[in-house]
Amino acid sequence: MRFDPETLKFDANGLVPAIAQDAETGDVLMMAWMNAESVARTLATGRVTYWSRSRQAFWVKGESSGHVQELVEMRLDCDRDCLLVQVRQTGPACHTNRRSCFYTAIREGEEVEIMAPMA
Amino acid sequence: MRFDPETLKFDANGLVPAIAQDAETGDVLMMAWMNAESVARTLATGRVTYWSRSRQAFWVKGESSGHVQELVEMRLDCDRDCLLVQVRQTGPACHTNRRSCFYTAIREGEEVEIMAPMA
């Protein structure tokens, strides 16, 4: 079946969560949001393109930092309301310069930093 | 630092997205939602517990199906508005009986089913 981004189930703001996963290591890198046009642009360009809720603008990941995400494969879930984008990540995915945004673990009730910023 | 679920950044409905990842294989299994009390219950019991938006009730994953998620580690992202739960998944995570909810890939513009229901 031909994929049409408009058939996704968007929230009240016209967005779906998109989980970025390192296609090679399987590490979950970040979660951000896409609207229908972001999805279409990501598929057309091979550059992962989110919708920035704070800036209300398209956000081509890495456009200013160089930390781009090259799309390997896009998947959607059973409810069509969440996307998984498998990517080749250049450098850190996180704005804190860490490889992944999920660098804080809860261990025995404490917040523990488990990942250092990249050199 | 002591972790307090109330310090997460919840959306207007008091929820954060929680990504479930197979702790062993790294596969992303599903995405669902948690409120502060779901987070607390998940940590206290070791059983991943979401908030069902459709039923407006706590949803102890696998409570009726037996397809439970045993918490291995909970992580939070840099913005404190998304969780990653690494789990030991019993059976399929998806209600369609597939291991993961992300069983549809977009390949050359077509929706392709890449995972069969478990036997």
Image: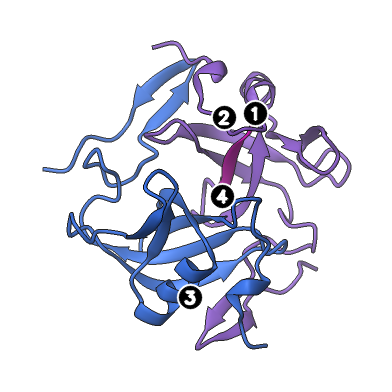
Chain colours: A blue, B purple
Q: Which comes sooner in the sequence, label 4 or label 1?
A: 1
Tell me which chain the residue with mark 2 is part of: B
Question: Which residue corresponds to the image point at 74% horizontal and 41% vertical from the top-left?
Answer: B68
Tag 1 and tag 3, C-beta contact below 8 Å? no
Mark pair 1, 3: CA separation: 30 Å
Residue placed furthest toward the front: A56
Amino acid of disc 1? Gly
- Which subunit holds the residue at mark 4? B
Question: What is the distance, in whole Å, between disc 3 and disc 2 at their CAs?
Answer: 28 Å
Marks 2 and 1 belong to one chain: yes
The residue that label 3 is drawn on is A40
Q: Secondary structure at mark 1?
A: loop
Gap between marks 3 and 4, in whole Å?
A: 29 Å
Q: Are marks 4 and 1 on the same chain?
A: yes
Residue type of the residue flagged with mark 4? Asp
**Along the polypeptide, which appears first: circle 2 or circle 4?**
2
On screen, residue B114 above or below A35:
below
Quarter containing the C terminus of chain B: bottom right
Q: Which residue is mark 1?
A: B14
Q: Name the residue carrying label 4.
A: B22
Magenta range: B15-21
The magenta stretch spans residue A62:
no
- With B96 as the anchor, is B115 left or right in this view? left
How many angstroms separate mark 2 from mark 4 (CA)? 24 Å
